[in-house]
Image (cartoon, rainbow, N blue to C red):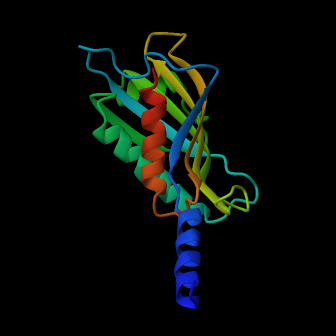
């Protein structure tokens, strides 16, 4: 084999090892949610309150907040989960000056959705698999859905969504889409 042939073979082998397929995994605890979206034939409006709880060493906080906001707003304005949704970022999910019931009444919403975003970002592991590089995007959040007049609500859940795999490397540009997709996976899980 000539030197040029070896270079081409080496380049092909590297490209094969570095290229990968992305897979999505969704873990919802305690179990798969039921009835998070409006029932068929009923029109509900939602008030969506969200906040962040990043780890202490979180980088690029402002960019992650903007990505979360864009993904959350896109999901609730384009999905069929609720007829209409109002999205609001808050410092805490229980604003001290107003009870949750009062917030729902003021907004005239049928449903209160509370989100606590804990992780939103890309992860890259070197030498983690035969492809040498394994990367994925991770979205972790707590989710609570409360319907007006229904004390037990639809429940509280922890959601851990990942998309990636061997040979996949992503930056932060996909984060709004990833936030959107993680919400869709949680709300439409069956």
Q: Position of residue 151 (x, y in %)?
A: 53, 10
In the rendering, at what x and y percent does residue 125 appear? 70, 59
Q: Is residue 83 left or right of residue 25?
A: left
The answer to whether residue 123 is visible is no
Query: At 47% across and 16% down in the image, what residue appears?
Result: 34
**Image quadrant for the N terminus?**
bottom right
Residue 104 visible in image: yes
When the figure is inspected, residue 150 is found, relative to residue 73, above or below; the finding is above
* Residue, far left: 41
Image quadrant in which you'd find residue 132: bottom right
Left or right: residue 79 versus residue 72 is left
Residue placed most toward the observer, 82 or 160: 160
Give the percent coordinates (x, y) of residue 31: 60, 19
- Report x, y in % for residue 62: 56, 63
The answer to which image quadrant residue 27 occupies is top right
In this rendering, is residue 147 above or below 2?
A: above
Residue projecting furthest to the front: 1
Kindly identify the residue that appears in the image at 29 percent across and 40 percent down: 78
Residue 64, relative to residue 25: is it above or below? below
Residue shown at the point (56%, 34%) measured from the top left: 26
């Amino acid at each position: 084999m000539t030197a040029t042939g070896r270079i081409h073979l080496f380049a092909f082998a590297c490209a094969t090892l570095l290229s990968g397929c992305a897979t999505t995994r969704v873990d919802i605890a305690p179990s798969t949610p039921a009835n998070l979206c409006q029932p068929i034939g009923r029109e509900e409006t939602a008030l969506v309150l969200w906040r962040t709880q990043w780890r202490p060493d979180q980088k690029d906080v402002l960019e992650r907040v903007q990505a979360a906001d864009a993904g959350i707003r896109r999901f609730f304005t384009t999905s069929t989960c609720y007829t209409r949704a109002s999205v609001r970022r808050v410092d805490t999910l229980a604003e001290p000056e107003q009870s949750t019931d009062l917030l729902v009444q003021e907004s005239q919403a049928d449903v209160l959705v509370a989100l606590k975003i804990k992780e939103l970002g890309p992860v890259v592991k070197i030498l983690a698999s035969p492809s040498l590089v394994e990367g994925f995007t991770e979205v972790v959040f707590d989710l609570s859905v409360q319907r007006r007049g229904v004390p037990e609500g639809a429940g509280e859940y922890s959601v851990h969504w990942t998309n990636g795999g061997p040979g996949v490397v992503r930056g932060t540009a996909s984060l709004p889409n990833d936030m959107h997709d993680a919400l869709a996976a949680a709300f439409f899980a069956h």
